[in-house]
Image (cartoon, grey):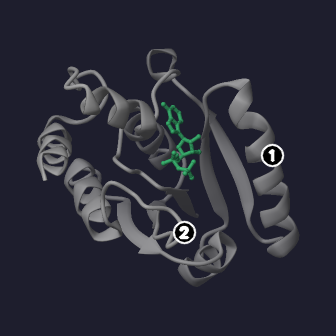
């Protein structure tokens, strides 16, 4: 069974890593799908985000990283995936996630969404929190993998 874990990952956090580790044990192959959304202006390009995640998952043999544009269900179909993996942090995630999963299911009934509830230590963590703390030069060691800290710092110096 192939699963897709889609997101912006701008940048990848330890919360995302936790979901990748846990969900990759439940499927044969996990594809981390990096959304290349032209509408948003991300801190990192899709290529940079893909490269960072590839580095972070290099010791996980059944995890692949790819970027995609357009509808998630179309990407899932093209990858032969039957499972979409998403993470749930707080009740505030729930409404949006429920709506997305129902919409996706209507568009492609062969794909189902599985939710992983956040590990307690990451329940507050998001890419936006990382960017905000970085902006004020705060310590990022508890938020992102070590090599990502350098990339975020380098971006902010530009
Ligand atoms: P999106 O823009 O699609 O929400 P994100 O990169 O912010 O993309 O998140 C991707 C997925 O990872 C979402 O399902 C989100 O709920 C989940 N996620 C993000 N941070 C955490 C965390 N700290 N713990 C658990 N899940 C998380």
- Numbered circles on residues, count: 2
Q: Judge by depth and name the residue closer to the eye, 81 or 151.
A: 151
Please tell me whether mark 2 or mark 1 is closer to you in this view. Answer: 2
Which residue reaches farthest bottom?
Answer: 78
> Is 115 drawn above or below residue 139 in the view shown?
below
Q: Residue 94: give x, y in percent of width and height.
A: 75, 35
Where, by quadrant of the figure, is residue 117 drawn? top right
Left or right: 25 in relation to 92: left
Label 2 packing within 10 angstroms: few (<14), some (14-19), many (20+): few
Q: Residue 1: give x, y in percent of width and height.
A: 58, 64
Distance from disc 2 to disc 1, alpha carbons, whole Å, reads 22 Å
Where, by quadrant of the figure, is residue 54 drawn? bottom left
Task: Check disc 2 and report its element: helix, strand or loop.
Answer: loop
Q: Residue 58: give x, y in percent of width and height.
A: 21, 54
Residue at (12, 46) in percent of width and height: 157
* Residue placed under numbered mark 1 in the picture: 98
* Residue placed under numbered mark 2 in the picture: 39
Label 1 packing within 10 angstroms: few (<14), some (14-19), many (20+): few
Left or right: 41 in relation to 48: right
Sequence order check, earlier mark of 2 and 1: 2
Where, by quadrant of the figure, is residue 47 drawn? bottom left
Residue at (65, 80) in percent of width and height: 74
Q: Residue 82: give x, y in percent of width and height.
A: 67, 67
Q: Are marks 2 and 1 in contact (CB under 8 Å)?
A: no
Task: Check disc 1 and report its element: helix, strand or loop.
Answer: helix
């Amino acid at each position: 069974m192939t699963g897709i874990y889609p997101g912006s990952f701008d940048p990848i956090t330890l919360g995302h890593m936790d979901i990748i580790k846990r969900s990759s044990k439940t499927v044969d192959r996990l594809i981390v799908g990096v959304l290349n959304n032209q509408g948003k202006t991300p801190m990192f390009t899709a290529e940079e985000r893909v490269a960072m995640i590839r580095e972070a998952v290099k010791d996980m043999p059944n995890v692949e990283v790819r970027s995609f544009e357009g509808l998630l269900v179309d990407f899932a179909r093209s990858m032969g995936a039957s499972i979409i993996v998403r993470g749930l942090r707080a009740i505030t995630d729930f409404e949006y996630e429920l709506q997305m999963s129902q919409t996706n299911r209507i568009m492609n009934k062969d794909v189902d969404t599985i939710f992983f509830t956040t590990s307690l230590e990451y329940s507050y963590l998001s890419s936006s929190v990382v960017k905000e703390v970085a902006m004020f030069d705060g310590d990022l060691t508890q938020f992102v993998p070590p090599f990502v800290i350098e990339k975020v710092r380098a971006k902010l110096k530009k």
